[in-house]
Amino acid sequence: MSGIWQQIISGAWLTAERIRAYSLILLTLGIVGFAAWFALANGGIDRNGKPLGTDFSNVYAAGTLIWQGKAADAYDPELQHAAEIAVFGGRDVPFYGWHYPPFFLAIAALVALVPYLWGLALWQITSFIAYCAALRAIVPRRETVLVASAFPAIFINIGHGHNGFLTTALLGGALVMLDRRPWLAGVLIGLIAYKPQFGVLIPLALLANRRWPTIAAATGTVIALVAISTLLFGTGIWHAFAESTAFTRDVVLEQGGTGWQKIQSIFSAARMWGADLPLAYAAQMLLAGSIAVSLIWLWRSDAAFALKAAALTIGSLLATPYVLDYDLTVLAVAIAFLARHGLDHGFHRGEVSILALTWIMPLLTRTVAGAIDLPLGLITMILLYVIVIRRAVADRMPSHHAPLAAN
C-alpha cells in the first residue's frame, strides 16, 4: 500500500506512454459513442427525444428568429420554445433557454444560414480547431492535441452542442498573447463578455498586473459589441435581455432547473445539500472573495506567468455560481499552463496526480453528484487552485525540498 501511495504522490505512475494510451482509449470510446448516437437519431432528434446537440437548438432557433426580424423573441421562453419546436418540424422537444447577451446573436444568425445538423457541425468543428490551437500554443508538444482531444469535458461540450471550445480558445489565446500582443489579448478578453459570468475576475488580475493596453482593448471591444448590437437590433433588445435574466436567475440557477448535479459551483453544492438562498449566496461570495484576494496577490507578485494564468482560469470558474459541467472544458487552459510549468521546472509532490484527477473529473462529476450528492467538480477545482497557489508560494521561497523531475 505504501508503494502505491508513493507512486501517487510522486506521479511516477503517469508515464508518457500511459498518457498516450489513456487518451487514445477515451478518444476512441468517445468517437464510437457519438457515432452510435448520431446513427440512432431521427431527423435531428435522438432516442431520448432530445435534439442532437441539445443546447445548440436554442442557438439555432434564436438565429431563425433573427432572420424573421424577431430577435427579441429569443428572450421570451414561450416564443423561444416555439421557435425550437419549429426547427424540428413541429416535433415537441424540451425547452433550452437563450440566456446570452445580444451580441452573441451574431453567432446564432450565422449557424442558422444552413440546415440544423450542418450548423451544429460547423459550430463544433470550427470552435474545436480554435480550442486545439490555443492549447497547442500553451504547450507546444506533439502529444498536446491528442490529450486535449481526449479531455472528457469536450465530450460533454459536444453532446450539448455548447460553447466551451470558444470560451477556452478566447481565454487561452488571450493569456498566450498577453505579453507579445497585449492589444489582441484585450480583444479576445472583450469577446469573452458573451459569457459575462466568467469575466468577473479577469479585470482584477489585469489591474493588479497593470496591463493597461489590454484593459483598454478589452473595454473598447465590449463597447463596440454593445454598440453594434444596438444598431442591428435596437435598444429594445437590451430591455428584453434584462427581463430574461430574472428567469435565468430564479428558475435555472436558484431553483436548480438545470439540475444541481450539472452545476459545478459552491452555490449549487450548498443548494443540493439543502441550504437556503442567503446561505448559498454567502458561501459563493466568501469563495469568490477569497479567490479575488489571492489572485490580486498572485498577479502583483513575481510568480511565473504560467501559474498566474492557471490560477486565473480556475478562479474564473469557481467565482461564478453558474458554471456547468460542459464549461469545465475551460479547465484545459489551467491544466495546460500548470503542465507547462511542471515540465519546465519539475513537478512538486502530488501535482501530477492532481492534474490527472482534474483531467478525468468531468467524466465522473455528474454521475457522482447524482448518486451521492458529492460535488466532485467543485472539490477538484478548489484542490487544483490550492495546488497552484501553493506552487507559487513555494517557488518564491528557498526550500529544502526540490521539485520532482518532469516525467
Image: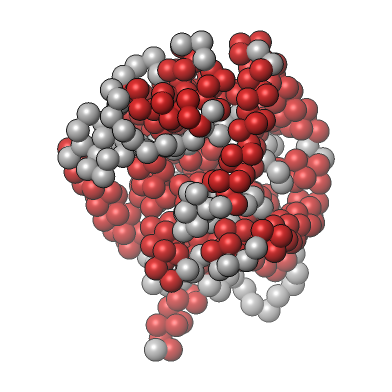
Dividing the picture into quarters, in which one does residue 302 lie? bottom right
Q: Is residue 70 above or below residue 133?
A: above
Quick one: quadrant of the N terminus?
bottom left
From the viewer's perspective, tell me whether residue 84 is left or right of residue 248.
left
Colour convention of the picture: secondary structure
Residue 256 image position (x, y, % from top left): 53, 53
* Percent of width and height locating residue 375: 51, 65
Residue shown at the point (38%, 57%) measured from the top left:
363
Farthest residue in the front direction?
Answer: 78
Give the residue at the far bottom of this rendering: 2
The residue closer to the viewer here, 233 or 313, is 233
Residue 100 in view (yes/no):
yes
Q: Image height check: is 148 above or below 19?
A: above
Q: How many marks?
A: 0
Q: Looking at the image, is 365 positioned above or below residue 196? A: below
Residue 22: image quadrant is bottom left
Q: Where, by quadrant of the figure, is residue 103 drawn?
A: top right
Residue nearer the viewer, 396 or 327: 327
> Looking at the image, which residue is at 62% across and 66% down?
275
Q: Return the residue nearer the eye: 143 or 288.
A: 288
Residue at left offset 53%, top offset 22%: 73
Q: Give the side of residue 381 with respect to residue 242, left or right.
A: left
Residue at left 46%, top 47%?
326
In the picture, measured across the screen, residue 394 lies left or right of residue 334, that is: right
Percent x, y of residue 98: 51, 32
Q: Work out whether residue 31 can be spotted.
A: no
Picture quarter with the C terminus? bottom left
Q: Residue 377 location, x and y as percent?
A: 50, 61
